[in-house]
């Protein structure tokens, strides 16, 4: 594997569309990334980019990007790039140009550009206002990032194509049907970049190219326009890229990237990453490249993606600080050409786990919580470990046979309960109420160091508040039922 890894890029993906950290986090995190062997960043700003002028409404500056306040001012966004430069990290900006455009098409102003009126994901490439918008976005992004060599134009998972009447007509009259629509739009975007920023190389996610006929890719000269980034995030057990893909790509493209995942690629509402799964994804990639790598003329390198949401409207998944151990394990696995116990031990030692074993599998909860680690934001990770313990205790209570048998909804509604049972239910509920309040204070305290209030509100409102409210309600009902003191069915309710 030496020939593939030497001098290659090892980029870390920053998915800022969910839980974008404050600048003070990047001040610690980016030097740390450099130290563990990253060579650069793939920055997906999405709606946190401080777009100006005609695009003001899209970006962080408009206050519409996140619930309250701009994640990054122009100065802060510049500072982020300065920190990366100081650390010697290459930066590649990613701007979506076809699908995953919810952050634009959700706005009234651009609603008319949707391919399907109801869905905000894909833009209509036939609409006369589409390219002016995309050109404007690219122009602002490129102007903001000085000295970049690459731009990533996304273009993955374009769910809706050839569906509006104009696009449908085009598919009917074109040689490759829907593939034509895709290739023509990518060509238009790429040609705009080549003409205006001739030094920039263009990267594209590869998934839409996988099923496009090689003749079509060659006819549209995709190899002269873009460099595909082949992404696959599954573990070895389910890793599945057709072998023929490498033959096809090697005939069309000279330069190829790959993308793995260290977070945001298992459950769409995952709280902490599953180390074993993500390590396995990197091992699978190493194994695929050992077989097919020789077919690639110029292997650019890997991007370790870390998704914050599955899409713009999805809830948050693993936060950046919660994923640092996984990221280290994955990057070391890649660098060493495979995983070993030595890697786990050295990463555990580096992160301050000491003799505590850095578990690779998700353990049954409650789980022991480490008390002192030494990477940026480790307390937040501990807070979520604690949350998972609490959530498990909560689920154990509400799903218990005792609740279903002696304290179910019908029984509470009819005041038909026996205090003997409820007296043993009340203490764990009361304790958990207190514990979740302590966790809330702990998490809020640590989250506010590195995250904006809109992120904290979303996390609390999604994860903690519903459990807290339900526990309070249960506590109250327990107390009422005990005070009722075991009566006939429908007591008080019947008399009320
Ligand atoms: Zn259309």
Image (cartoon, rainbow, N blue to C red):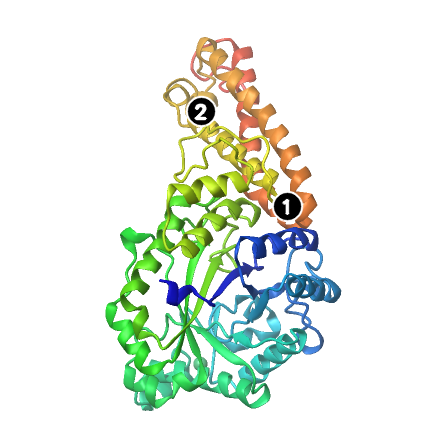
Q: Quadrant of ligand 1?
A: bottom left
Categorize mark 1 by other alpha carbons within 10 Å: few (<14), some (14-19), many (20+).
Answer: few
Q: In this view, does 398 lie to the left or right of 50?
A: left
355 to 81, vertically: above or below: above
- Tag 1 secondary structure: helix
Give the residue number, with chain letter if any, for mark 1: 457
Q: Could you tell me residue 310's position as x and y percent?
A: 47, 57
The one of 378 and 272 positioned closer to us in this rendering: 378
The one of 392 and 448 positioned closer to us in this rendering: 448
Q: Could you tell me residue 107's position as x and y percent?
A: 60, 69
Can you see residue 20? no
16 to 254, vertically: above or below: above
Q: Could you tell me residue 239's position as x and y percent?
A: 30, 57
Q: Could you tell me residue 13's position as x and y percent?
A: 52, 61
CB of residue at label 2: within 8 Å of ligand 1?
no
Q: Please report the residue visible at 33 percent of the width from the left and 52 percent of the height from the top.
A: 235
Give the residue number, with chain letter if any, for mark 2: 397
419 to 193, vertically: above or below: above
Q: In which quarter of the image is residue 48?
A: bottom right
């Amino acid at each position: 594997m030496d020939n593939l890894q030497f001098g290659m890029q090892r980029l870390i993906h920053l998915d800022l569309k969910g839980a974008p950290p404050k600048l003070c986090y990047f001040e610690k995190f980016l030097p740390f990334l450099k130290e563990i062997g990253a060579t650069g960043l793939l920055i997906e700003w999405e709606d946190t980019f401080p777009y100006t002028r005609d695009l003001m409404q899209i970006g962080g500056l408009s206050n519409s990007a996140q619930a309250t306040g701009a994640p990054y001012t122009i100065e802060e966004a510049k500072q982020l790039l300065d920190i990366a430069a100081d650390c010697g990290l290459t930066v590649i900006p990613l701007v979506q140009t076809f699908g995953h455009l919810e952050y634009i098409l959700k706005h009234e102003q651009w609603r008319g550009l949707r391919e399907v009126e109801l869905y905000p994901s894909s833009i209509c490439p036939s609409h006369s206002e589409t390219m002016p918008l995309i050109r404007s976005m690219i122009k602002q992004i490129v102007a903001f990032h000085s000295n970049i060599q690459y731009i990533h134009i996304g273009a993955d998972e374009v769910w809706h194509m050839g569906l509006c009447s104009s696009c449908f007509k085009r598919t009917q009259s074109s040689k490759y049907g829907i593939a034509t629509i895709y290739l023509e739009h990518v060509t238009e975007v790429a040609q705009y970049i080549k003409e205006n920023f001739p030094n920039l190389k263009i990267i594209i996610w590869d998934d839409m190219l996988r099923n496009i006929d090689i003749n079509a890719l060659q006819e549209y000269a995709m190899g002269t326009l873009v460099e595909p980034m082949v992404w696959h995030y599954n573990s070895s057990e389910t890793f599945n890229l057709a072998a023929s893909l490498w033959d096809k790509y090697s005939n069309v493209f000279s330069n190829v990237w790959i993308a793995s995942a260290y977070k945001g690629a298992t459950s769409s509402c995952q709280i902490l990453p599953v180390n074993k799964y993500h390590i396995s994804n990197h091992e699978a990639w190493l194994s695929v490249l050992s077989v097919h790598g020789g077919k690639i003329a110029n292997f650019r390198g890997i991007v370790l993606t870390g998704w914050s949401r599955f899409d713009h409207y999805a809830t948050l998944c693993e936060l950046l600080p919660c994923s640092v151990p996984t990221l280290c394990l994955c990057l070391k696995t890649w660098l060493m050409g495979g995983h070993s116990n030595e890697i786990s031990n050295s990463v555990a030692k580096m992160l301050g786990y000491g003799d505590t074993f850095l578990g690779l599998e998700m353990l049954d909860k409650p789980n022991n919580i480490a008390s002192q680690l030494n990477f940026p934001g480790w307390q937040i990770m501990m807070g979520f470990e604690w949350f998972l313990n609490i959530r498990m205790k909560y689920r154990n209570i509400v799903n218990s046979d005792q609740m279903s048998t002696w304290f179910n909804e019908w029984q509470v509604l009819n005041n038909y309960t026996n205090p003997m049972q409820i007296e043993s239910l009340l203490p764990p509920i009361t304790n958990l109420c207190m514990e979740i309040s302590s966790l809330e204070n702990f998490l809020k305290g640590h989250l506010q160091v590195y995250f904006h209030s809109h992120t904290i509100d979303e996390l609390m409102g999604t994860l903690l508040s519903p459990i807290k409210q339900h526990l309070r309600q249960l506590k109250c009902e327990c107390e009422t039922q005990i005070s009722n003191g075991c009566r006939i069915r429908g007591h008080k309710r019947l008399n009320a």
